[in-house]
Image (tube, grey):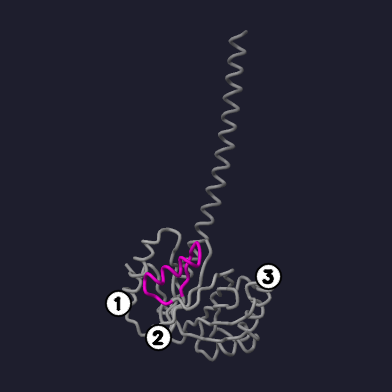
Amino acid sequence: MPKYLIEREIPDAGNLSAEQLKNISQTSCGVLGNLGTQIQWQHSYVTENKIYCVYIAANKELVKKHAKEGGFPANLISEVATIIDPITAE
Amino acid sequence: MKTLKNIFLILLALTFTSCTNNQKETNEDSLIAALQLQVTKLEKENSALAMVTPENLSKNMNMYVIEREIPALGEWSSEDLKGASQTSCGVLKEMGTDIRWLHSYVTGDKMYCVYLAANEEMVRKHAKKGGFPANQINSVGTIISPQTAE
């Protein structure tokens, strides 16, 4: 299944409390539970005004559906071609 | 004589079965060993990823997500990506221990890089020296995952 990187523009995301982040994660996981096994959330980087999410999904449509049902923005959804790291240089 | 022949045939059949079983077991064993190796490798990768979080970094290090807009990046060959990684690592080596590259997500026309650095300036300096764009540099406050919901 392809991997996607999703940019979610959320003003002041960096100021969300642990409790708020937990609630958001619960909403996300709830929607994922309804969508079945064709979409999976790996992890998300929370920055000041943007959350970068890494998902595995059968297609982009499912990522959009998850965002819509969960009430999350999905400003940019890009398929990840590959992941590189310092080992790639060797 | 007939009995002897029968015994011989049974023995032959048994030897054959035992050989095939051995062969099968060896195949299964090597398959299990290969799978075990893969699982260990994945566990190591996951724990390495789990170990680096903004919360457990030393006080003078921050985590950043850097957006690099690179048109047609998705068409780069593995050789192109290797070249870029070498350039990046070369610059990093010159810059010392206050900046570290964790990994980067390569998409169609944007690269999302995850770095640890003492400050945003180091990230800019690395980009400038390596000739990479750094269109946005965002400090990571925390990493969330399905575990955060528990």
Nearest to the observer: residue B135 or residue B125: B135
Quarter-of-image position of residue B17: top right
**CB within 8 Å, label 3 to label 2:** no
What x and y, as percent, mark residue A9? Answer: 44, 82
| Label 1 to label 2: alpha-carbon separation | 17 Å
Marks 3/2: CA–CA distance: 36 Å
Q: Mark 2 points at which residue?
A: A11
Task: Residue under label 1, please give it.
Answer: A19
Q: Which mark is residue A30?
A: none
Q: What range is drawn magenta here?
A: A53-73
Q: Quadrant of the N terminus of chain B?
A: top right
Q: Residues within 10 Å of mark 3 (few under 14, many from 20)?
A: few
| Disc 1 and disc 3 on one polypeptide chain | no
Which amino acid type corresponds to the residue marked 1 in the rendered image? Glu
Going 57% across and 89% down the picture, which residue do you hit?
B124
Secondary structure type for disc 2: loop
Quadrant in which residue B140 is drawn: bottom left
How many angstroms separate mark 1 from mark 3 (CA)? 43 Å
Q: Mark 2 lies on which chain?
A: A
Disc 2 residue crowd, few under 14, some 14–19, many 20+, Cα 10 Å: few
Is tag 1's residue or tag 2's residue first in the polypeptide sequence?
A: 2
